[in-house]
């Protein structure tokens, strides 16, 4: 009976869904799934969704999942555009499906930093995802390698917006969340530029880490946590943090419905290249497990 239940559950889960692509490399297992019932392709790294895209031509450039225009990132881009030049220079660390390029304007310059060559290959394969091929209104540069190393090659104060989208429930690249990494980001950011972290995570709450880092460098910040359950329009819950040298640089985001001021508790040591504490940011359940 138990065996029948397990088999039945597997069959139900698989109805209307199929695996289009799967591969494993040094960085883990990548899969592309097709959901025929909802006309969607999904990109997974391990068990974590790294983006989705509609397969319907008229909706292929809709930013879905964490990147939805009605979510925090959509409002971040809306506020960013209120007071920034039309020819803004934007850097995204972490490619995923390439969904963020749907926010691009023709006069802008966009650069993606991605460490995993398999991710670049999948995002550029039109049989899986077409954000980069169909939705890139702006010129796009692709830099393959560790962003912490590759960013050194970018001119100082060259980026108006720097988005870090490299944190997931599968793995945390700690070296991208240290004081030394923050100093690098700030050196490449224009004086009024915004530094945005995507920290949606099932197991870890990185808000305090970023609050401590911000305090250590005199930055202002807001945490934007959207806990709305997944919506029929393709929007998923997400958590974003915005840092700036002055609160005026992120303007109306301070009054956003999902925003809270980023305040350091002062109880944790600031993460550096020589110190980090993953256990301190686990979302411990009531029974003490995670």
Image (tube, rainbow, N blue to C red):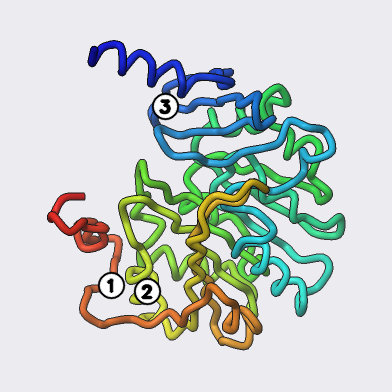
**How much space separates mark 2 and mark 3, taking CA atoms?**
31 Å
Q: Nearer the viewer, residue 4 or 257?
A: 4
In the displayed structure image, the side of residue 254 where residue 275 appears, left or right: left
Q: Mark 2 near mark 3, Cβ–Cβ under 8 Å?
A: no
| Quarter of the image where one finds residue 28 | top left
Q: Residue at x 65, y 84 (%)?
A: 251
Up-down relation of residue 282 to residue 137 (above or below): below
Q: Earlier in the sequence, mark 2 or mark 3?
A: 3
Give residue 93's position: percent from left, percent from top: 55, 52
**How much space separates mark 3 and mark 1, taking CA atoms?**
32 Å
The quadrant of the image that shows the N terminus is top left
Q: Which mark is residue 213?
A: 2
| Quarter of the image where one finds residue 265 | bottom left
Residue 136 in sight from this viewpoint = yes
Label 3's element? Answer: strand
Give residue 66's position: percent from left, percent from top: 57, 52
| Quarter of the image where one finds residue 158 | bottom right
Q: Which residue is mark 3?
A: 29
Give residue 281's position: percent from left, percent from top: 26, 61
Label 2's element? Answer: helix
Q: Earlier in the sequence, mark 2 or mark 1?
A: 2
Q: Mark 2 near mark 1, Cβ–Cβ under 8 Å?
A: yes
Q: Which mark is residue 270?
A: 1
**How much space separates mark 2 and mark 1, taking CA atoms?**
6 Å
In the displayed structure image, the side of residue 205 where residue 102 appears, left or right: right
Q: Residue at x 35, y 63 (%)?
A: 206
Q: Earlier in the sequence, mark 3 or mark 1?
A: 3
Answer few, some or many: residues within 10 Å of disc 3's Cα (few below 14, many 20 plus, some between 14 and 19): some
Q: Residue at x 68, y 25 (%)?
A: 125
């Amino acid at each position: 009976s138990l065996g029948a239940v397990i088999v039945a559950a597997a069959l139900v889960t698989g109805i209307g869904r199929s695996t289009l692509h799967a591969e494993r490399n040094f960085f883990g297992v990548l899969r592309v799934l097709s959901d025929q019932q909802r006309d969607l392709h999904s990109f997974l790294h391990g068990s974590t969704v790294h983006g989705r895209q509609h397969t319907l031509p008229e909706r292929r450039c809709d930013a879905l999942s964490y990147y939805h225009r009605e979510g925090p990132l959509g409002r971040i881009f809306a506020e960013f555009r209120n007071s920034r030049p039309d020819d803004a220079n934007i850097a995204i660390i972490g490619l995923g499906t390439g969904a963020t390029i749907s926010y691009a304007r023709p006069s802008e310059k966009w650069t993606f930093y991605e460490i995993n060559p398999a991710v670049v290959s999948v995002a550029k394969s039109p049989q899986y995802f077409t954000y980069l091929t169909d939705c890139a209104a702006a010129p796009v540069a692709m830099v393959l390698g560790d962003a912490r190393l590759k960013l050194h090659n970018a001119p100082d104060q060259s980026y108006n917006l720097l988005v870090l989208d490299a944190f997931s429930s599968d793995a945390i690249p700690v070296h991208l969340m240290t004081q030394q990494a923050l100093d690098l980001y700030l050196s490449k950011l224009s004086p009024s530029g915004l530094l945005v972290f995507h920290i949606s995570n099932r197991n870890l709450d990185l808000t305090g880490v970023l609050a401590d880092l911000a305090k250590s460098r005199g930055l202002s910040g807001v945490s934007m946590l959207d806990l709305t359950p997944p919506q029929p329009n393709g929007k998923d819950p997400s958590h974003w943090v915005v840092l700036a040298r002055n609160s005026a640089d992120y303007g109306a985001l301070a009054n956003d419905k999902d925003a809270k001021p980023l305040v350091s508790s002062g109880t944790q040591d600031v993460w550096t290249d020589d110190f980090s504490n993953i256990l301190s940011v686990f979302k411990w359940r009531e029974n003490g497990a995670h």
